[in-house]
Image: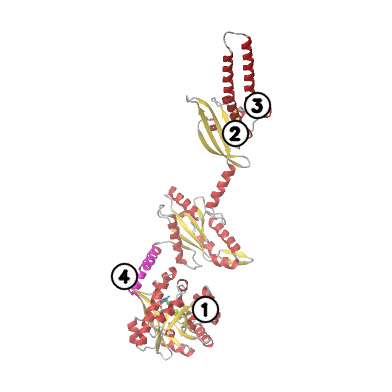
Amino acid sequence: MVARMPRIYTERYSIILCTMIFSGIWQIFCIFSHSPVDHSTIGFGMGGIIIFYFSIFYRPLKLLDHMLSDIISEIPEALFVFDPNGKCIWVNETGCQMADIQNEIFEKAERNLIPVFGESVMNHQNWSDKKTVHNDTKVQYYALESRSFTDERKCLTGSYLRIRDITKEQKKLKKEIYNATHDILTGLYTREYLYQRIAELLQISKHKHYLIIFVNVKNFKIVNDVFGKAFGDDTLRIVADWVKKDLSDNCCYGRLGGDTFGVLIPEEEFLPKQIEKELSDFVIRKKNADYQLLIHLGVYSVKSSDTDVSVMFDRAHLALSTIEDDYKFHIAYYNQDIKKKIIWNQNICTQLHEALYKRQILPYLQPIADRTGTIVGAEALARWIHPEHGFMSPASFIPIFEKNGMIAEVDKHIWRCACEILSRWKTESKNLFISINISPKDFYFIDVLAEVQNLVKEFRLSPASLRIEITETVMMNDADNRMQILDSFRKAGFIVEMDDFGSGFSSLNLLKDMPVDVLKIDMKFLGKTEDKSKAKTIVRNIIRLSEELGISALTEGVETQEQYQALSEMGCELFQGYYFSKPLPIEEFEKIV
Ligand code: C2E
Ligand code: MG
Ligand code: MG
């Protein structure tokens, strides 16, 4: 049984057996020697000590030693063990492969490690380091660690050097860092990383004058919608290549999001004339068809490197608002006027609720006359009687509220005021209508139909006395749903008017399907056009067309008697314009009807 046991136990029991046999022989010898002193006790004592030492200390220690050396030999890290003089006394398997040595020639390990990792590897102190080693074909990364050992009297007993190949981890880490800091589609920096890099660059070169540039592809949505996402992606790559094309190492650039890019560039390297030239004809090609991309640049000149980078880009972005859909100029600069405009917009927005509550915003009424010149109704046009800025026309606040959605608040207020007036007229037996303007943006924020219907119910009005003015832009989004809403308005007895017909890209085709009762022809046809006879022909034909479609025609902007007469002869039924009156405060309007 002992022979079949692991060697450690075989050895251990063999020693016990031998000691016992020896003790037995010693005992027999003592008995037969008839010595007056019993030497057998000494023999048993010695035997006990030997068994104790070999079975309790020596063998387990040797076993531990053996197992540890096996474990260390097999670990994937290279391990070099040195004596106090720095002589290599043991190298594990990986170490041998790394230093390209046979197990027994340890000195060679030192000679082979120094050229690869430098002198420090033979420095027998405690340290750790990371090294990049460039081989002919590839780059390897290693983590090095050296530890020295001392005894209880602080005398050096030896040291070891551990070398771990961390190439895989390092490459994975680098890839993860790259993915986190670079945009997958274009390979440029992500917005967050770009902001961080710019902040660092501005901090280290404070004396240099830099520009922040916000690049926006204005008509990218159309590219995506018309040509598909794959072509949209190609387009973004083309724009990204253009953005980084001529930039030096002093610049920093990245993709801010969707179709926007950001650049930090030293002022002297920015060449606006060249850029304008390139952008005036920035064409992308799809199956032999050229498509012109509209790219705009907003520029902010960095004043202080301590300003938040996101704020700088916000300002560069704001500069873009000054060139809306311009194909002529592609670069806009942030300046004090823009800053003032932003502050103005903010003030206006914060003051809105108080203004509505205090009735500083109210409708003025502009008369609408029929062919006999009789005033049959009015259009309610918003005015803000501002305590500080005085009389404000809608052009100074409606576009601001249309952008941020607060327009619905203004409109609801004006509609309510119009209903109040109509309700009073009803008691005074004044049989006039009021047209209210409905912004296309209202449909995003409120249930326009329910809102207007509730008002009419609340004030007990006939729906026909409250006319609904919409513009054709209402149909630009969600056309089917909007058609249904207009249809519901008509079915409920309201009269629907299409405002500013001819001012945008009015489609006569649209008119065929639009559920409207009145066509309000834009005043631009009556204005100072170069070719008056052509404008006249257009108006005549629009009126004729509306007649044939069973839609009444109303012309806006009638300023002279000649215009009024000519339009009457053409068949126009209703008229609005300064010839009759400007928009008036309610009391004044009531005086003239
Ligand atoms: P709109 O609805 O087309 O209103 C007609 C505009 O033409 C009014 O400008 C009116 O004062 C002006 N106008 C009328 N007759 C003449 C004329 O003979 N000659 C000239 N040159 N102009 C004339 P206003 O009041 O400045 O309103 C401008 C626009 O603001 C309106 O155009 C309308 O789109 C919008 N708006 C006005 N009030 C409101 C409102 O309460 N809600 C909404 N959503 N928009 C409103
Ligand atoms: Mg109108
Ligand atoms: Mg109009």
Q: Is residue 123 left or right of residue 74?
A: left
Residue under pointer 4: 388
Front label number (1 vs 2): 2
Q: Which residue is mark 1?
A: 484
Residue 291 location in percent, x, y?
A: 58, 67
Instruction: Give the spatial CA distance, label 3 vs label 2.
Output: 25 Å
Give the alpha-carbon distance from disc 4 to disc 2, as whole Å. Answer: 85 Å
Say which quadrant the C terminus sits in: bottom left
**Residue of label 3:** 10
Give percent across and percent down for residue 216: 50, 62
Q: Which image quarter: residue 364? A: bottom left
Which amino acid type is marked by label 1?
A: Gln
Whether residue 52 can be seen here: yes
User: Mark 4 is on which residue type?
Assistant: Glu
Q: Which sits earlier in the primary sequence, circle 1 or circle 2? A: 2
How packed mark 3 is, by other alpha carbons closer than 10 Å (few <14, some 14-19, many 20 or more), is: some
Q: Nearer the viewer, mark 3 or mark 4?
A: 3
Q: How is the image coloured?
A: secondary structure
Residue drawn at point x = 43 percent, y = 89 percent? 370
